[in-house]
Image: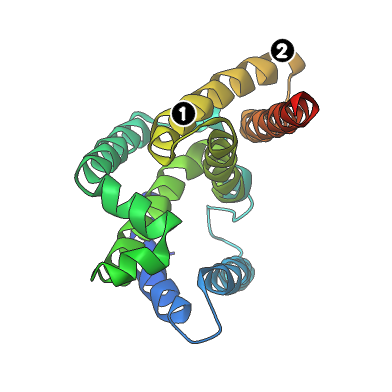
Amino acid sequence: MLGWSIPLGAAIASVAIVGIMTLIGRVKRQGSQVASGILLTAGFALGVTVQSLNPSLPVHVDSYLVGSILTVTSGDLVLAVSVLGAAVLVLAVFGKQILFSTFDVNGYRAAGYREWPIEVLTLVLITATVVTAMPAVGAILAIALIAAPAAAARLVTRTASHIFIVAPVLGAVSGVAGVLFSRSLDVAAGPAIALCAAALFVVALLVRSLERMWLRLKL
């Protein structure tokens, strides 16, 4: 509507959303889950409303909900590589603080650290990842592609630091497998990638459950 680049507009909106999520998350008896739910539904509703009021817009909201890997441009790839480099740099510098605050919030506070800077940094990384993944897999499926490999990695790793290594590998495997399945089954690549990520989580969950059952039988 304003003639701006879609990724640029999404990046600007993400900065505002990160700030609002941080403020809502710090309200007593609320949290990041509440903030995510409110802003996610409000954002979708706003997008549909704007499109309804301006039917001549060349961009449709639903096209950015599921995405299309076949329409990814070289600019999208450059943006993705840039975000990847920034994420690796942030994890190299602040990885220990992120782990500390994520898995032991009370200990992090007791050590004298402020929680909100790491929260903001983490939210910025997540939103930047979603923005760069939208052209390929869409906004909704990008969230699944972020959450599922991380959840699966947490089930199969022994230490928290190993999650940083295993999760990206599982994400890459999901991407390659999803593209291959989409070509062989003639289905959309984005949903196929997200389903592969979900399948990896189910496999990890089953392996973890079988491992626990085996240990109980040995005892």
In the rendered image, residue 40, in percent from the top left (x then y), is placed at 58, 66
Residue 120 locus on image (x, y percent): 33, 64
Quarter where residue 80 is shown: top left
Give yes or no for contact between labels 1 and 2 (Cβ–Cβ under 8 Å).
Answer: no
What amino acid is labelled 1 in the image? Answer: Val
Residue at the image point whose x is 63% and y is 71% from the top: 45
Q: In which quarter of the image is residue 74?
A: top left
Kindly tell me whether residue 17 is visible in this rendering.
yes
Horizontally, is 88 left or right of 76 in the view? left
Residue 166 marker: 1
Of callouts 1 and 2, which one flags the residue occurring earlier in the amino acid sequence?
A: 1
Neighbour tally class for label 2: few under 14, some 14-19, many 20 plus, Cα within 10 Å: few
Q: Disc 1 vs disc 2: which is toward the camera?
A: 1
Q: Which of 207 and 25 is in front in this view?
A: 207
Compared to 67, does 216 lie above or below?
above
Position above or below: 136 against 122: above
Split into 4 quadrants, where in the image is the N terminus? bottom left
Q: The C terminus appears in which quarter of the rendering?
A: top right
Is residue 162 found left or right of 64 in the rendered image?
left
Q: Can residue 8 be seen in this view?
A: no
Q: Tell me where residue 207 appears, x and y as whole percent.
A: 70, 26
